[in-house]
């Protein structure tokens, strides 16, 4: 492990995404852009240090850790805080990395994901005068100095499932996960519900492979070969839209679709906008299920700067802007002409509660 004050990656890390347990938490306020200097230049430096510890994926995983880390970097520019960070190359490094951040006199320590949940709680109890925030993890007995950041991604995945079903030419779409844990399966369940809703409204019978009647998991977040095999098998089975929920392994699906022969297949990316984050994603990413991790990390840091930080459970939803789907980008001319309007109305209906998502 190495500590970086500049925010630059300073150690190699395995491409493993920290997927977390789903927090059953109340909805929080919407993430904001407050604190940004009006000129667009960096804010004056202030006496506040914000720090972050990664999961095993490192800060350039194109997904979970990277989006969270961008929130830390944004706080440096927008708020004028000093930042420090520590990348974890393995689970065994997470606890000492958190200790190193506390020893570095960090005012707030932000951690990311399921694997680091226990270590974060232990540190929070040990250091009650330090503020902590953890991305995509929740506690039944949350320490008083911890802010949890969770996201109701099934709402956004519902929209993505509807869109995938509307786009599909074969009548068969698919999804696979890294591991069968709540914050993976919540995407898959929302996706399935969105496809089913499309079928109900349109009188169609688009099938979902990989969740529902069948389940498809890599069983880790590091086996790119297996993720590629799953993707290739789905394409061979007639699936023309794939939603991988496997952190950096989503790249395997992008690669498979890029190399498929018909030029019509597509990917639904998750966590970040795959049009920007996935390598060679622009030609194949239909849309993405977005979790506004960077914004909520920056908001948590800002509350510390403003001395309004409190231990609480934040839940990002469509209503408060914590989750959404990305634009169709290059697929705008390829999807049905009425689809964008239907998605916009469906978003309103989910927020209003007239369309139910999840339990």
Image (cartoon, grey):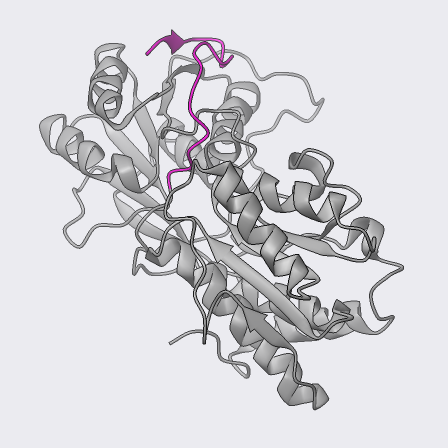
Q: How many numbered marks does the figure carry?
A: 0
Majority secondary structure in the magenta region: loop
Location of residue 104 (image quadrant): top left
Residue closer to the observer: 179 or 143: 179
- In the image, taking residue 231 as reference, residue 64 lies left or right, namely left
Question: What is the x, y in percent for residue 15?
Answer: 46, 29
Q: Is residue 187 above or below residue 280?
A: below
Residue 291 at least partly seen: no
Q: Is residue 266 above or below residue 173?
A: above
Residue 349 at least partly seen: yes
Question: What is the x, y in percent for residue 129?
Answer: 17, 26
Location of residue 300 (image quadrant): top left
The stretch of residues the image draws in magenta is 1-18
Q: Residue at image x 49%, y 9%? A: 6
Q: Is residue 334 above or below residue 88?
A: below
Q: Residue at image x 42%, y 25%? A: 14
Reply yes or no: does residue 5 show up in magenta: yes
Q: Residue at image x 74%, y 53%? A: 327
Q: In this view, which residue lies farthest toward the left?
A: 126
Q: Is residue 238 above or below residue 45?
A: below
Residue closer to the observer: 294 or 161: 161
């Amino acid at each position: 492990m190495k500590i970086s004050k500049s925010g630059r990656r300073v150690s190699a890390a395995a491409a493993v995404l920290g997927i977390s347990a789903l927090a059953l938490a109340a909805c929080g306020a919407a993430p904001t852009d407050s604190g940004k200097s009006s000129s667009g230049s960096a804010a004056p430096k202030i006496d506040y240090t914000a720090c972050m510890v990664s999961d095993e994926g490192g800060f350039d995983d194109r997904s979970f850790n990277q989006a969270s880390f961008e929130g830390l970097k944004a706080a440096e520019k927008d708020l004028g805080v000093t930042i420090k960070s520590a990348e974890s190359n393995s689970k065994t490094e997470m606890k000492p990395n958190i200790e190193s951040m506390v020893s570095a006199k960090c005012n707030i320590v932000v951690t990311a994901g399921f694997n680091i949940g226990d270590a974060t709680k232990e540190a929070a109890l040990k250091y009650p005068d330090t503020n902590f925030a953890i991305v995509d993890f929740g506690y039944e007995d949350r320490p008083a100095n911890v802010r949890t950041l969770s996201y109701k991604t099934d709402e956004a995945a519902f929209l993505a499932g509807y869109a995938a079903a509307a786009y599909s030419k074969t009548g068969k779409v698919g999804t696979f996960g890294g591991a069968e844990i709540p914050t993976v399966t919540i995407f898959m369940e929302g996706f399935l519900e969105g496809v089913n809703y499309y079928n109900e409204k349109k009188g169609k019978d688009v099938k979902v492979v990989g969740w529902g009647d069948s389940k498809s998991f890599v069983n880790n977040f590091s086996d790119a070969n297996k993720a590629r095999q799953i993707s290739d098998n789905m394409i061979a089975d007639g699936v023309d839209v794939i939603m991988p929920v496997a952190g950096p392994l989503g790249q395997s699906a992008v690669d498979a679709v890029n190399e498929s022969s018909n030029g019509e297949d597509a990917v639904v990316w998750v966590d970040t906008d795959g049009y920007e984050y996935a390598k060679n994603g622009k030609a194949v990413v239909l849309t993405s299920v977005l979790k506004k991790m960077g914004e909520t990390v920056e908001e948590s840091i800002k509350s510390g700067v403003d001395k309004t930080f409190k231990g609480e459970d934040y839940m990002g939803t469509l209503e408060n802007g914590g989750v959404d789907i990305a634009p169709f980008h290059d697929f705008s001319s390829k999807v049905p002409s009425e689809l964008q309007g239907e998605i916009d109305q469906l978003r309103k209906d989910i927020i209003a509660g007239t369309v139910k998502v999840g339990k």
